[in-house]
Image (tube, rainbow, N blue to C red):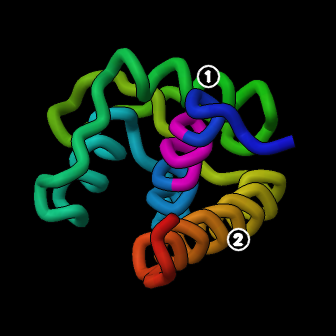
């Protein structure tokens, strides 16, 4: 069954977060900044989307969280990628490639009009 719009959006956020955590543990704000900076300010992840997504990924055992001190000496939850998260990242990357290739085929289609 094809993904619904909400599933695709959640999957895309999961893909971005999991890919970000490949670089090492980060707190939520660090994840947000990384995605924003690497995307040249095009992608902005709101707290209202990020933290529920992190919670879902933690429940799926894709990531683990532990308390630590941020650069500002504040307590923050640091998220790290687990083995299941690496497998999920590979699956999400395959899904993303499939989706973008399908969209590209539709956008570049030149055929007869009815």
At x 47%, y 54%, the residue is: 16
In front: 77, or 32?
Answer: 32
Q: In the figure, is residue 76 to the left or right of 22?
A: left
Pick the quarter of the image with the N terminus. Answer: top right
Name the quadrant containing residue 47.
top left
Residue located beneath label 1 in the image:
55
At x 80%, y 33%, the residue is: 60
At x 58%, y 33%, the residue is: 5
**Residue 114: x percent and y percent?**
51, 64
Question: Magenta stretch: residue 28 in it?
Answer: no
Q: In the figure, is residue 76 to the left or right of 15?
A: left
Position of 87 relative to 31 (above/below)? below
Residue located beneath label 2 in the image:
94
Name the quadrant containing residue 86.
bottom right
In front: 21, or 56?
Answer: 56
Residue 38 is labelled as none
Q: Secondary structure at mark 1?
A: helix
Position of 5 relative to 99 (above/below)? above
At x 39%, y 38%, the residue is: 27
**Residue 109: x percent and y percent?**
48, 80
What distance separates the C-alpha of mark 2 from that of mark 1?
A: 23 Å
Question: Magenta stretch: residue 13 in it?
Answer: yes
In front: 44, or 111?
Answer: 111
Position of 39 relative to 75 (above/below)? below
Q: Secondary structure at mark 2?
A: helix
Name the quadrant containing residue 49.
top left
The magenta stretch spans which residues?
9-15
In front: 45, or 108?
Answer: 108
Q: Residues within 10 Å of mark 1 (few under 14, many from 20)?
A: some
Q: Residues within 10 Å of mark 2 (few under 14, many from 20)?
A: few
Q: Earlier in the sequence, mark 2 or mark 1?
A: 1
Q: Main secondary structure of the magenta part?
A: helix
């Amino acid at each position: 069954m094809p993904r619904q719009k909400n599933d695709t959006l959640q999957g895309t956020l999961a893909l971005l977060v999991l890919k970000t955590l490949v670089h090492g543990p980060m707190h939520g704000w660090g994840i947000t900044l990384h995605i924003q900076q690497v995307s040249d300010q095009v992608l902005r992840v709101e707290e209202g989307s990020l933290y529920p997504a992190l919670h879902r990924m933690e429940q799926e055992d894709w990531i683990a969280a532990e308390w630590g001190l941020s650069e500002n000496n504040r307590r923050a939850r640091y998220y790290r990628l687990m083995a299941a998260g690496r497998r999920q990242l590979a699956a999400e990357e395959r899904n993303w490639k499939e989706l973008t290739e399908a969209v590209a085929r539709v956008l570049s289609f030149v055929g007869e009009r009815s």
